[in-house]
Amino acid sequence: MDAVRIYGGNCLCGQTTIQGSKNASLPILAATLLINGICEIENCPDISDVYHMLRLLESLGCKVEREGSLVRVNTEQLSKCDMPADSVRVMRSSIMLLGALLARTGSVSMEYPGGCVIGARPIDLHLQSLCRMGVAIEQQKQGFSAESVRLKGAAFRLPFVSVGVTENLLLAAVMAEGMTVIEPAAKEPEIQALCEFLNLAGARIEGNGSGRLTIHGVKKLKPVRYRIPADRIVAGTYLCACMTAGGSIFLRDAPVEDMESVLEYARRMGIIIESEADGILVRGRACKRISGVLRTGCYPDFPTDMQSQFMVAMAASGQPGQIEETVFENRFRIVPELRRMGADISVQGSTAYVNGGRKLCGAIVHAQELRGGAALILAALAAQGTSIVLNRHYIDRGYEDIVIRLRELGAKIELA
Ligand code: UD1
């Protein structure tokens, strides 16, 4: 069955190693298309989104090899610019291939990308921005085709910050004619990793990590070997496992410097966190109320990808709390499932009110997207009794062996 069974009510104790970042590996794998030759990407997580990205690269004529967490992408035989519809539809990051393919081949046709249903998630800004770089786009009902003779640099004043648009424009701009300026650019650590990878390959990107990126187009990039940084959202999720179930766990390789806002909120909820040279030690259980609102935002603010896990930690703590979601308009889909587990949560517009005082109990619940699905497992760890979380495939999109990792941390959990 596509499910996980959890026996709740047990404290955690143990250690695990944090996998490579999903949101860094996907655009970096797309970026290998810009390079004629063999790139070696280390620490690539073994998750289904990466599997789909590698399938997409193969469908374009790339040769892909995996040896443990090392992935080799050979783009010498890149031959096509059409992508298999099923892989494009399951994953929003397939849009990342657009900028890279236009730069390398000048022509793309693809279905509209899919991904987790956490809001409207349009791609209008991706397409409009690429048009300004000299791309002609023809939209049909199911998909679109894009052509460009030569990409041209442009100065962008974007209407809002978008991780995906910043990445797509970076990929289109590094080999475009002239200079491109992206403002406001997203500053997420995954954008910084993409810039690092591209600069290592010979790109000229300035302002990495700031809200303004300047890209001077170059003629050619060279093959490189690059290590994907650890996944701050996965580390945050296991931190939240301790917050809900209680105990003491060590998260090896947790990227502590990228997790400041998450660690701060966890501390405010009563968790003890100690940074060590090779990871973080987490102790305790969420027991304190956060005064004020936990508000999601663009990095370095609190990540929307950690919102559901903190909602669960609040619900398990028995303390009331408020969460405001400012990035996606439909990211409270976990609420009805948590209510089935006994939580008292109400939603008004973009704010969720977690009313304290209730204990979580085991139930059969449905994962409906990646992070919300992982959060349901966390709720089940704290709940009295047994729970089943259905639709495990959503969780497998971003978490490598979540059942094995949680067992290493002392959870009673199995595939069902
Ligand atoms: C990326 C992350 C995702 C994270 C999100 C916000 C990856 C693979 N995914 O998603 O995990 O939750 O950043 O940190 O890295 N928007 C438009 N038009 C567009 C593009 C975006 O209206 O053309 C809107 C979106 O609907 C959303 C907001 O902009 O409301 C931000 O989205 P964006 O930053 O683009 O998120 P993703 O790149 O999809």
Image (cartoon, rainbow, N blue to C red):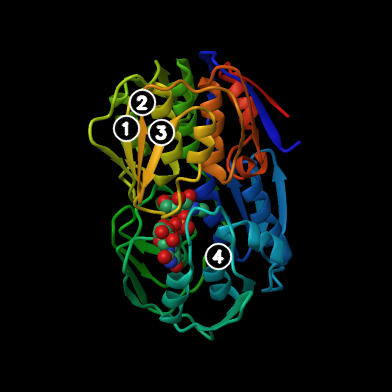
Q: Is mark 3 within 8 Å of ligand 1?
A: no
Q: Badges 3 and 1: C-beta atoms under 8 Å apart?
A: no
Labels 2 and 4: the sequence-earlier one: 4
Labels 3 and 1: the sequence-earlier one: 3
Q: Is residue 165 visible?
A: no
Q: Residue at x 59, y 69 (%)?
A: 112
Where disc 3 sits, the SS reads helix
Rounded to the nearest angstrom, the CA distance separating label 2 from label 4 is 41 Å
Labels 4 and 1: the sequence-earlier one: 4
Labels 4 and 3: the sequence-earlier one: 4
Res 321 label: 1
Disc 2 target residue: 356
Amino acid under label 2? Gly
Q: Residue at x 67, y 43 (%)?
A: 393
Q: Is residue 361 visible?
A: yes
Provide residue 313's location: percent of width, then percent of height. 42, 28
Disc 3 target residue: 310
| Left or right, 218 with reference to 353 | right
Q: Residues within 10 Å of mark 4 (few under 14, many from 20)?
A: many
Disc 4 target residue: 95
From the image, which quarter does the C terminus lie in? Answer: top right
